[in-house]
Image: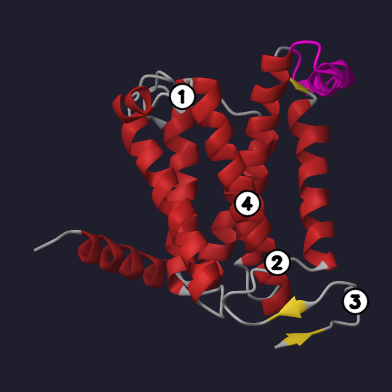
Amino acid sequence: KATVSVLNCLPVHTTPQSMSVCAESATISAGVVASYLAFYSAYDKATKNLNLALLKRVLSFENARFSFLQLNKVTGLAALTISGLGLTPASFTNSCATGLMTIAAWMGAFHAGSSFYLFYGLNPVKAVKGQGKGVKVEVPALAMGAVGLGMLGWELKTNSDVRSPASYVALLMSLLHFYFIETPTGLPQDLPCRPYAYLSVATAMTAFNAFGFGNLFRELVGTVCKAIPL
C-alpha cells in the first residue's frame, strides 16, 4: 500500500516492488550530483584549485566526448555516494533510503551503459577481454561493478528493507569496482583521483561501520560461497 509523507509530494511505497523515489531523496541526490560538478569536475589537477572554466567546458559540450566522459565519472561517483548515504541507518528513514538506493541504481545503470559505449564501443568482446580502460585488473573490476549493480537491483525489487546485508555487499562490490577500474596498477598509491572523489569512499566506509565490518565480511564470504557451485 502507498502512504504519503508530510515532507514529500510523491507517494512513498513500502512494498518491495515499488522502487519509488520520494521528493526528499531526489533533493538529496541532486545535491550530491551538484557537489560533484562543483568540487570534482571544476577541480584543476595542475593547479590543485577549483577552476570554473573546467566546469564550463564540461557543461558546454564543445567537445562532446570530453563532456560525456566527465559526466560519466560524476554519475558513477555520485551513485556510489548516494548508496553510502542510503545505507547509513541513522541518517534517513527506510522510505527515503529506498528512494536514495533506487536513484543510485538507475544512475549506476546509466554509468554502466555509458561506459560500455565510451570505452568499449558497445563491443561485448572488448569488455570481456578488458580492452577499454587499460588498467591491470580491468576484467575483475568490471565483474565487481556488474555484481554490485545486479545485487542492488535485485534487493530493490524483492526486499522491503533496502538496508539488507546483501545491499551492503553490493555497495562493497561497487566501491571495489571504483578502486580497481581507476587504478592502473591496482596499487593504492597509483589511484589518480581528484580529492573530492574520496567523498564516495568516506560515505561507503561510514555505512560499513554502521553495519559492522565483521558482519560485512561474513556476508561477503557467504555470498561468494553461494555463488560458487560445489
Q: Say which residue label 1 marks.
A: 190
Instruction: Indicate the colouring scheme.
Output: secondary structure
Measure the C-alpha gap from mark 4 to mark 1: 29 Å
Instruction: Name the quadrant containing residue 72.
Output: top right
> As shown in the figure, which amino acid type bears the numbered disc 2?
Gly
Q: Is residue 158 left or right of residue 103?
A: left
Disc number placed over residue 151 in the picture, else none:
none
Residue at x-position 44% and y-position 55%: 150
Measure the C-alpha gap from mark 4 to mark 2: 11 Å
Q: Say which residue label 3 marks.
A: 7
Which sits in the foreground, 133 or 150? 150
Instruction: Name the quadrant containing residue 17.
Output: bottom right
Q: Residues within 10 Å of mark 4 (few under 14, many from 20)?
A: some
Determine the secondary structure under disc 1: helix
Q: Residues within 10 Å of mark 1 (few under 14, many from 20)?
A: few
Q: Which of the marked residues, 4 or 2, is nearer the chain's N terminus? A: 2
Between marks 4 and 3 in the image, the one whose residue lies nearer the viewer = 4
Q: Which of the marked residues, 4 or 3, is nearer the chain's N terminus? A: 3
Q: Which of the marked residues, 4 or 1, is nearer the chain's N terminus? A: 4
Residue at x-position 73% and y-position 72%: 96
> As shown in the figure, which amino acid type bears the numbered disc 1?
Asp
Measure the C-alpha gap from mark 3 to mark 1: 44 Å
Determine the secondary structure under disc 2: helix
Do the residues under discs 4 and 3 have CB atoms within 8 angstroms?
no
Disc number placed over residue 99 in the picture, else none:
2
Do the residues under discs 1 and 2 have CB atoms within 8 angstroms?
no
Q: Say which residue label 4 marks.
A: 106
Measure the C-alpha gap from mark 1 to mark 2: 35 Å
Which sits in the foreground, 87 or 195? 87
Q: Which residues are magenta?
A: 47-63
Looking at the rendered image, the quarter that the C terminus falls into is bottom left
